[in-house]
Image: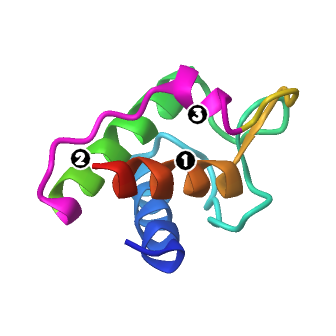
């Protein structure tokens, strides 16, 4: 799966949160969008729902059971106090390619 497809699935997960009312406004999946950290648009409940949504969508797309681990994602984001879409894409690409 390439970066474009991963970004599309991330955007679909953001859109799902908006439709369900878990986030107050649309979040656009661009590299600098902050997913976790001070300037994130998501609270803790919507963040957990977002990751669960991603796991479901990537499992469906890949035909494999996918579990995203925040502690593993941190390895792609050392010395940062926030998580961006760009880092999330890198992690997911790496994760899917090692499967």
Q: Write down the residue under mark 1.
A: 91
C-beta proximity under 8 Å, tags 1 and 3: yes
Residue 76 is situated, as x and y percent measured from the top left of the image, at 68, 39
Task: Please report the residue visible at 80 percent of the width from the left and 59 percent of the height from the top.
Answer: 32
Separation (CA) of disc 1 from disc 3: 6 Å
Left/right placement of residue 19 relative to residue 61 reads right
Give the answer, above or below, for where 94 lies relative to 6.
above
Q: Say if the magenta span includes residue 12.
A: no
- In the image, which is nearer the foreground, mark 2 or mark 1? 1
Give the answer, above or below, for where 49 lies relative to 27.
above
Q: Is mark 3 on a helix, strand or loop?
A: helix
Quadrant assignment for the N terminus: bottom left
Query: What stretch of residues is rendered in magenta?
Result: 61-76
Q: Write down the residue under mark 3.
A: 73
Q: Say if the magenta span includes residue 75.
A: yes
Left/right placement of residue 54 relative to residue 86 reads left
Q: Write down the residue under mark 2.
A: 56
Task: Please report the residue visible at 23 percent of the width from the left and 47 percent of the height from the top.
Answer: 56
């Amino acid at each position: 799966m390439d970066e474009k497809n991963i970004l599309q699935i991330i955007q679909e997960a953001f859109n799902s949160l908006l439709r369900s009312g878990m986030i107050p406004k649309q979040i656009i999946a661009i590299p600098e969008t902050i997913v976790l950290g001070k300037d994130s648009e998501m609270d803790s409940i919507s963040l957990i729902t977002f990751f669960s949504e991603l796991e479901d969508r990537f499992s469906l797309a890949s035909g494999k059971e996918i579990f995203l681990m925040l502690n593993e994602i941190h390895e792609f984001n050392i010395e940062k106090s926030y998580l961006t879409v760009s880092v999330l894409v890198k992690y997911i690409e790496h994760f899917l390619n090692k499967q």
